[in-house]
Image: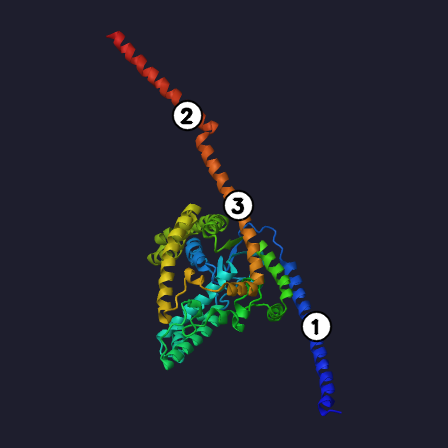
Amino acid sequence: MDPKLKWAVPLLIIGSVIMLVNTSFAEDDYQRCEIAVNNWATSQLSQEVKEDKHTLRDLLFFLHIPRTGGRTYFHCFLKKLYSSRLECPRSYDKLRFNPRTAHCRLLVTHDDYSMMTKLPKEKTSVVTILRNPVDRVFSTYEFSIEVAARFLVHPNLTSSIQMAGHLRKKNNVVSTLDIWPWKYLVPWMREDLFSRRDARLSRNLNLVESKNSYDMEHFAMPLHQYINDPIALDIVHNGATFQVAGLTNNSKLEESHEVRTCVQKYDSLGDSVLDVAKRRLDNMLYVGLTEDHKGSATTFAHVVGAQVISQLVESNSSMEHQAMNITEQNSLAESESQIGQHKADDNLIKVLPNAVREVKRSKMTVGNLMEAYESCITHLRKSQSQRRINSLKRISPVNYTKEARHQVPESMIEQIISLNRLDMELYKYAQNIFAGQHEQTVQKLERQNSILINSFMTPHWENISLIMTIVLVVVAILLFVNARRRMSKVKV
């Protein structure tokens, strides 16, 4: 018997056994994952019950999905409505307060929906903004490199890391490097940019082999490499769905890692997570779209802004009452002693500025809010644009623009769509929710305009009676004056 055949049979048997074992293991792993995902989804869906999702509650939680324009809403809407006194301590890197005992009214964070486990759920309203997943992936890639490029002012990677750590410690501020997901994406791109710069310098390379800014491998990581990297697969793709579902790698749920890993491994299990994310969008006070800027801003102002203003009007009356009480105490202290007067004055100084600011905000109208918003975004966009230009100069000729995106092959766009299947479905669902909200806002404005026009065109009966009375009085006076004149002429 041929020695080769002698060993071939046992090898075939061993190979078959290994295949059977692997198949069995894969089936067992899928079943384990299916049970884990379904159990999680069932438990989450049972908690999603909102009696009145249209009413703003005590705490507004802005679930900020990265690269959707949330920073614009925060600076140009929310900071116009809420004073710093009402804003919760910034929690982009970690929870810096006890939400169940704090008296703040606004929480803005990149945290996912699992943050709701730390908040008084029955007193919290959630708002968010979604973006076309393809554009969001582009924007995430561009911003990761833009921020990382700022560190290229340093001679090497070690120097940039040491200086960044020193500045964060010295200034005691929350850095981009502390914020999810940038605390993962920016250091990744920073290390990559330094590596590519060092390679260029060592080889004395200055040639640009491509005119496509998304494929200049000597200067920055090409887009095709970025979207297929395990870091992007874990954090970027389907990021909106995982964030709304509460399953990011920044989640506060113990089971989040297992569920997210199972969904990333078995695509079909993602539908259960998608169902949870959709239900959560259904229960949010407001869902905006980055692409429909004007419509989203108008809807936000009328759905959220109007209710915040209404709340401020109510709280304003209590603040005025508080200031009045302190003023009375001040008067009493003045009559008793000079020392007492100084103490009362100090109390008044502490309270009155807050009261004045809150009164000013409570007198704001939705129209004023929209005017302030439009003015704010103009300045904000200019500053952001200039900052991007300054950052990208360090990796020139790379330049990310909307026009430059057209140079990306269609095959890569299709790959991004495929990698973000869940986000594509969630975005379509969000479009339907937004369309309903926007239609209700438009109808509300039309009713208000109709009432306003009718109030001018059709006076109330009380007004007609008043006008008639005034006319009759004027006529009577004129008749009386004319009669007196005639009498005077007769006498003469």
SS of the residue under disc 1: helix
Q: Nearer the viewer, residue 450 or 23?
A: 23
Residue 382 tag number: none
The residue type indicated by label 1 comes to Glu
- The crowd level at tag 1 (other Cα within 10 Å; few <14, some 14-19, many 20+) is few
Identify the residue position indicated by label 3 in the image: 439
Name of the residue lying farthest toward the right: 1
Which percent across, then down, holds residue 23?
70, 75
| Label 1 vs label 3, nearer the camera | 1
Identify the residue position indicated by label 2 in the image: 467
**Which mark sits nearer the N-terminus, 2 or 3?**
3
Identify the residue position indicated by label 1 in the image: 27
Which percent across, then down, holds residue 238?
55, 64
Q: Nearer the viewer, residue 441 or 285?
A: 441
The residue type indicated by label 3 comes to Glu
**Which mark sits nearer the N-terminus, 2 or 1?**
1
| Label 2 vs label 1, nearer the camera | 1
Please name the residue shown 52% across and 72% down the image.
229
Please name the residue shown 76% across and 92% down the image.
1
Which percent across, then down, holds residue 480?
33, 15
Gap between marks 2 and 3 measured at Cα = 40 Å
Q: Quadrant of residue 152?
A: bottom left
SS of the residue under disc 2: helix
